[in-house]
Image (cartoon, grey):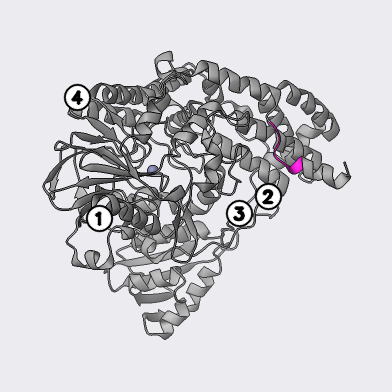
Amino acid sequence: MSRAETEVAKQTPKDASSSVVLQQQAVLRTLPFSDTADFDDAARGFLGTLEHAKIISASGRTVWSLEPYGFLAQSEAPATVNPSLWRQSRLNMNHGLFEVVPGVYQVRGLDIANMTLIEGDSGVIVVDTLTSIEGAAAAMELYFKHRGKRPVAAVIFTHTHTDHWGGARGVLDDATLASGTVPIIAPNLFIEHAVSENIIAGPAMLRRAQYQFGPLLAKGPRGQVDCGLGKSMAAGAVSLLRPTDLIMATGDKRTIDGVEFEFQMAPNSEAPAEMHFFIPRYKVLNLAENCTHNFHNLLPFRGADVRDALAWSKYLNEALRMWGGRADAMCGQHHWPVWGKERIDTMVRQQRDLYKFAHDQTIRLMNHGLTAPEIAETIRLPKSLEGAWHGRGYYGHIRHNVKAIYQKYLGWYDANPVHLDPLPPVEAGKKYVEYMGGADAILARAAKDFAKGEFRFVAQAVGHLVFAEPDNQAARAMLADTFEQLGYAAESSTWRNAYLFGAQELRHGMPPTPGRPPIARETLAALRTEQLWDVLGVRLNGPKAEGKHIVLNWSFSDTGETFVLNLENSALTYTQGAQSEKADASFTLARSTLDEVIAKQTSFPEAVGAGKVKVGGNPMRLAELMGLMDEFPRMFEIVEPKRTVVT
Ligand SMILES: [Zn+2]
């Protein structure tokens, strides 16, 4: 083999090592693979679909397609995929329109999330609208094809995540929207939370999300196979519609197109605003995203506020009390339904106890003094939950959910002063390498441990070497190979994606990505003005702003709001409902004009020139302030040192 060929061989995904093969065989022996009820449920009521679930936008872009996942037709898991994850990945291949009960239908597998369609006296109520306008339009077309064309009587958003509302304009056309005749129903505080979760920390979250979902990984037995909740993230155009009717309290009811809905509020569970409902006419229960066919995430890898496992469990218990024994079918907004009173009851109880067990046992071990990694190493699900397929950690996982619970109560610090002020990765890496006798000594020992399957420690040790010597190709290759084996063995799709994407970036560097598009107008319109100032505040470059004092008055003609924006001590603050007599400049404009500027549809000087902004004082002080703002890169290094110096 030539040297160049050797290099290429190093870059190619490898086979599963013998220790991973043994691990996969143990999974096959331990979990109840003979229980195939999920496969029947996931296919039950099938009415029709689109070929390969393929959705193409008007401009010819593929918004969604399951065609690249054809390799999942094979029932037996290859050695490079955990058999439990392989099983879930195959279940998530079901796609099309399905009958839940006569009168209630679901479009599944055309997006990561589901659309639920409930037939009323003359129209249809659409629950959740998928991620994209193109996806939602395709789902509606599929439904109409099989159930006949009928008007949309209402749209319900179960919660605030984009895969549940992004496609609303594919369900309601402009004329219907303008008529205002179709209610849009959502849980209280929907609009406040729909976009804010991803705004302040958005740039960091989006980059981290690549590690969670693996969109830039090749799909295949050595690449991305699933996301646990569904196949993948959908592409396409997203739009946010404002709800016209908010559900405020548990027990609230609505009769829509002759169909009665009973609601239950579930805030701060899987989403900050979320709700469940029961439909007595159809005896169908919908627990949104709080009772799915996997252990959900208490803290997704992209980063988020930690979710409240205790509250989550209580909502499921309350749902049992409210509707236990009344539902013939239970469907959620991901995965497939469950039928039969007893099976529904069992699943909700097990899910309730899954979150409660994780919460209580984490706190118990924490109160005995165990730290987060020690808890993760110690905790085991009870046997009665371990064998329940819907409790498996395909998205969240017990081993990282316990760390989220620890973080929620105690934060990042484990109270051991060794961890109070450690050297950062590059400086620590260099010292570790020195202490361990240099790169060659580390790699020689790592190769031995790799052969024994001690991948977790090899990753820790060689990780130091990569941070000390990022251009050491042998170190990068060793760490990549190690991540890969950890990814192959992982049951959680998010672990697999994280490890395999880490391996890919070590082998090939960060993939090129197009520049970040500006925030969409509709998203901006959903933000409160204070949130815009908050976003501006986190862009302020503190060192550059040293010694500056800038005071600006803002007055918004359309919303009637006034603000003083104040820069001093390298911090940008604002006061609402006030104007400063000592302001350097004053601006009067419509909030919508400010949105246009931020969305880069116009520039501030252009808006001034067009007479859309009334200016007093010295407007150059605004230009000076904006000159202190950072632009965030779309990509930054994660598995290796930052190449750009950030101060
Ligand atoms: Zn979702």
Q: Residue at position x 68%, y 29% from top?
A: 16
Q: Amino acid at mark 3?
A: Met
Name which of mark 4 and mark 2 comes first in the sequence. 4
| Circle on res. 325 | 4
Determine if the C-beta at disc 1 is less than 8 A from ligand 1: no
Tag of residue 365: none
Residue position for label 2: 642
Q: Which residue occupies the foreground of this view, 436 or 72? A: 72
View quadrant of ligand 1 = top left
Earlier-in-chain disc, 1 versus 3: 1
Q: Secondary structure at mark 2?
A: loop
Question: For the residues carrying marks 2 and 1, which lies nearer the camera in this image?
Answer: 1
Check residue 243 in the rendering and tell me which mark sits there, or answer none: 1
Q: Nearer the viewer, residue 619 or 342?
A: 342
Query: Viewed as shown, does residue 262 lie left or right of 139?
Result: left
Q: Is 176 left, or right, of 457 in this rendering?
A: left
Which percent across, then down, holds residue 437?
84, 29
Q: Quadrant of the N terminus?
A: top right
Farthest residue to the right: give it: 2
Q: Tell me the SS state at disc 3.
A: loop
Asked if the stretch drawn in magenta spans residue 35, the answer is: no
Q: Mark 3 — residue?
A: 635
Residue 225's x, y, as percent?
54, 39
Between label 4 and label 1, give the one nearer the viewer.
Answer: 4
**Which residues are the magenta region?**
10-15
Instruction: Determine crowd level at label 4: few under 14, some 14-19, many 20+ residues with C-alpha closer than 10 A.
Output: some
Q: Is residue 395 visible?
A: no
**Is residue 511 at all visible to an observer of this figure?**
yes
